Each structure stands twice: as structure tokens, then as C-alpha cells.
Image (tube, rainbow, N blue to C red):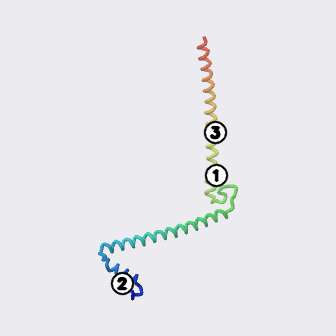
């Protein structure tokens, strides 16, 4: 290395590159790593852009939902088909609730009758054993 050269570091790098001999396999390996890095960088950038876009869309959707007036009746501003479906579901709910309440009352009555008969049988058994 001579001191007369203005950039001695460059001479060192040039001499280091001259001493390294690249064969074809090494060049393909380096090219593959470069392409892999490029693909991963593109993938990361596109994911970030997509996440930013989705956050913006979700903020816009939330802003729209917040700006809509809340009414006491659910789906009061829905299309007529949806409102008819909702009325039908409420009617079905009322019918099913009535059926279940009736069946529960019948089962409770049967359980009371069974408890009374069990008590009667136990009393008869006690009387039988007392004799």
C-alpha cells in the first residue's frame, strides 16, 4: 500500500476483491440471496400498506356507525324484508316460549304428584312395619 494514493481504504478493498475468486455456484448463491431479500422486502411493504389501508377503512366504518342515530327499536331502518323476518322471529320466539312454559308447568305438576304418591307409599310402608 502506498501513501501517495488519496484513498488507501479503496486500495485495500480492491486488493481483497482481487484475491477472492468467485466461481459460478457462489455467484448463483449470492444472486439467490439478493432475490430472496428483494421478495421479502416487497412482501413486508405490501403487508404494511394493506394493514394501513384496513385500519383506515375500519376507522371510516366505525365513524359511519357512530354517526348513525341509535333508535330504541333494533333494525328499525332496515329494509322491509328484514323487518318482516324480524317480526316472524319475534312471533316464533313468543310461540316457543309459551310452549316451553306450558311443558315446564306440566312437568312440575307431574313431579308434585309423584312426590305425593312417594310420600303416601312411604307412609303405608311405615304403617305396615309398625303392625
Q: Is residue 44 left or right of residue 28?
A: right
Q: Is residue 11 left or right of residue 71?
A: left
Residues at marks 2 and 1 touching, judged by CB atoms closer than 8 Å? no
Looking at the rendered structure, the secondary structure element under dot 2 is loop
The answer to which of marks 2 and 1 sits earlier in the sequence is 2
Which residue is at the far front? 3
Looking at the image, residue 62 lies above or below residue 104: below
Which residue is at the far bottom? 4
Quarter of the image that includes the N terminus: bottom left
The answer to which of marks 3 and 1 sits earlier in the sequence is 1
Residue 45 picture location, percent across and down: 49, 71
Task: State how far apart marks 2 and 3 are (Cα).
Answer: 101 Å
Q: Residue at x 30, y 75 (%)?
A: 24
Q: Residue at x 61, y 53 (%)?
A: 85
How crowded is the residue under tag 2: few (<14 C-alpha within 10 Å), some, or many (20+)?
few
Name the residue that disc number 1 marks.
Answer: 87
Q: Residue at x 63, y 43 (%)?
A: 97
Name the residue that disc number 3 marks.
Answer: 101
- Single out the mark in the foreground, 2 or 1: 2
Name the residue that disc number 2 marks.
Answer: 1
Residue 115 picture location, percent across and down: 62, 26
Amino acid at each position: 500500500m502506498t501513501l501517495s494514493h488519496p484513498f488507501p481504504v479503496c486500495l485495500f478493498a480492491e486488493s481483497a476483491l482481487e484475491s477472492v475468486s468467485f466461481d459460478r455456484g457462489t455467484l448463483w448463491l449470492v444472486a439467490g440471496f439478493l432475490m430472496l431479500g428483494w421478495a421479502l422486502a416487497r412482501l413486508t411493504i405490501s403487508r404494511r400498506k394493506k394493514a394501513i389501508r384496513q385500519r383506515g377503512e375500519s376507522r371510516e366504518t366505525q365513524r359511519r356507525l357512530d354517526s348513525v342515530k341509535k333508535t330504541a327499536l333494533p333494525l328499525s331502518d332496515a329494509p322491509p324484508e328484514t323487518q318482516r323476518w324480524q317480526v316472524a322471529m319475534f312471533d316464533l320466539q313468543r310461540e316457543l316460549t309459551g310452549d316451553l312454559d306450558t311443558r315446564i308447568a306440566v312437568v312440575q305438576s307431574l313431579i308434585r304428584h309423584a312426590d305425593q304418591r312417594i310420600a303416601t307409599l312411604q307412609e303405608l310402608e311405615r304403617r305396615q312395619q309398625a303392625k
